[in-house]
Image (cartoon, coloured by chain):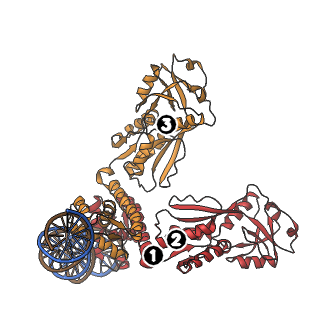
Chain colours: A red, B orange, C blue, D brown
Amino acid sequence: MNVRDLEYFIKLADIKNFSKVAASFNVSQPTITFALQRLEKSFGAGLMIRHRAHGDLSLTDSGQQLLVHAKTIVDEYQLAQRELTEKQQGRLAMGLPPIIENTYFPQIAKRLKRVGLLNKLYTLEEGSMTTLQALQAGNIDVALLATIQPITDEKLVVEPFDQQPFAIYVSKKHPLAQRSGVSFAELKPESFVLFKQGFVHNQAFNQLARQNHFRPKVAFRSNGIQSLLNLITDDIGIGFLALTTPVNDGVVRVPLLDDPQPAFTTSLVYRRSHVFNPLQQRMLNVMRDSLQ
Amino acid sequence: MNVRDLEYFIKLADIKNFSKVAASFNVSQPTITFALQRLEKSFGAGLMIRHRAHGDLSLTDSGQQLLVHAKTIVDEYQLAQRELTEKQQGRLAMGLPPIIENTYFPQIAKRLKRVGLLNKLYTLEEGSMTTLQALQAGNIDVALLATIQPITDEKLVVEPFDQQPFAIYVSKKHPLAQRSGVSFAELKPESFVLFKQGFVHNQAFNQLARQNHFRPKVAFRSNGIQSLLNLITDDIGIGFLALTTPVNDGVVRVPLLDDPQPAFTTSLVYRRSHVFNPLQQRMLNVMRDSLQ
DNA sequence: GCTATAATATAAATAATATTTATAAGGCAA
DNA sequence: TTGCCTTATAAATATTATTTATATTATAGC
């Protein structure tokens, strides 16, 4: 059984027109007819009910059932193709959200450079949520990402390497700068500068807001950590971050006193099905060493 | 890309000999050579390193990587085949462990019979653990099964419908028969009659034994609930069961007082990827109704 | 009821792909 | 070097997929 037939079938189930499916694959219309007949014969079951002249085409029960499996098969096949393509073999594609890049990447980069592997690393910089999707889709091989709750996807291997509480970051001139701690409920009157969508920070932030029954004001959203820190320095708003590294002089960190409180867990994550080649394996080990 | 080539490849990775793989598929040896060449060409990567004359054959990194995906694809394909075969379409294959059969099946059977669907039901009677494996392998469509902890497999849909504490069952003549409750620790001197392997009862039993730091004596193991009850009546040993239905006159139920204590949760379980046809859907609804 | 139209199916020819038979070539051991 | 086992290759053949051209079916508009 040919995977190509399944691809035709999936498209046909979607757009429900033989000629258009044929056109989309650059083949002639009877090709689609024959492909469907082949599938029906090989599975011993009718898959689609054809209503010609009438614009519709419906799946039989068997057809629906096959569709589920067909999608799994085609996805897996495409994933294999992406992973095996020669140009992929010589490098490691890693998802690296900016905040993690700031805190953990310098030491990794230093070590990779020392062993001459830094130029084999390709990075994708997106928020942790987006990064997770890219990993699941097979667009990257591995990711360093942050979560506030355990990842449940059975298909992924998750190796946590650090955990960090969230804290409030304010300008030196801000009244809160004098405090040794603050509870989220006290922040109701404040304006925040936050990350854009796709960052787990927002999940944690929303969770705390829900717990405290108010809807915080958001002055601005950005994708860059540096830009957020600048805004905080200028007192445009206060920040909600989880950082290990010290920040610049203009910004003061104030711990959050809430309990329970979401924690920013950073993990090394990859697909269970992914087999790393020796080059990738070596790079991965360097990273694990850098992160302890 | 043909699934057949992946089947050849998987077998080749396993037995590492072209001629023997060819023989096992009833094709000639060059067929396997060409199949492998096709795969290598289509994925643009070497998959196996051939050491002729030397008995071994090894997978390249790409080969190992492909092997993982190939297995997923072939498994999914075979699952689709089993699900779609015409003779499967007219019936519902259900896993039904004996204890669950005893307690919940009579009412299901009554209702199914009333609507003339009982003869469309095929049942497989094994312990809950074995049943779970059969479900995952695609050998049955649905199962009623018992667990003492939540099922974590993402590929399954689990609908719990009842929960039951475990209890001790003793003969009328047994000293414990007078008691209104007993803690597991007190049962150290007793002999038990238990189910054979594959039943969750043993998981729960072992858990309690571990908690209480002793290794209980087992007088006999059986696959049949009735046979166990007979042995209990004759005072061959005491039983550890989770039953809703009353038992015969010779046997007395004594609740377990331990806290925490494993609970016998019964659920309706099926594969997320399985599409039920209308007949199966109807049968499933009858079952859900019977179980509330 | 026709006729036009849009959709799918079929037949026959052709193209592409897979498999076989027969044979070659590599590598090791006696 | 010879013999043996293993995998590769060439050429022929068989099988399968696709195309072109045309038929069939169902519906809408007249």
Subunit bearing disc 2:
A
A255 relative to A27 in the view: left or right: right
Please give the name of the residue rendered at 77% of the width and 79% of the height, measured from the top-left corner.
A230
- Which quadrant of the view contains residue B188? top right
| Residue at the spot of label 3 | B202
Residue B117, can we see it? Answer: no
Marks 3, 2: nearer the viewer:
2
Subunit bearing disc 1:
A
- Rendered view: B235 above or below A26: above
B271 relative to B263 in the view: left or right: left
Residues marked 3 and 1 touching at CB (< 8 Å): no
| Residue at the spot of label 2 | A282
Please give the name of the residue rendered at 50% of the width and 69% of the height, measured from the top-left corner.
A281
- Rendered view: D12 above or below B59: below
Residue B114, can we see it? Answer: yes
Helix, strand or loop status at disc 2: helix
Of residue A126 and residue B265, the one placed in the foreground of this image is A126
| Residue at the spot of label 1 | A89
Of residue B70 and residue A31, the one placed in the foreground of this image is B70
Q: Position of residue A24 (x, y in %)?
A: 38, 78
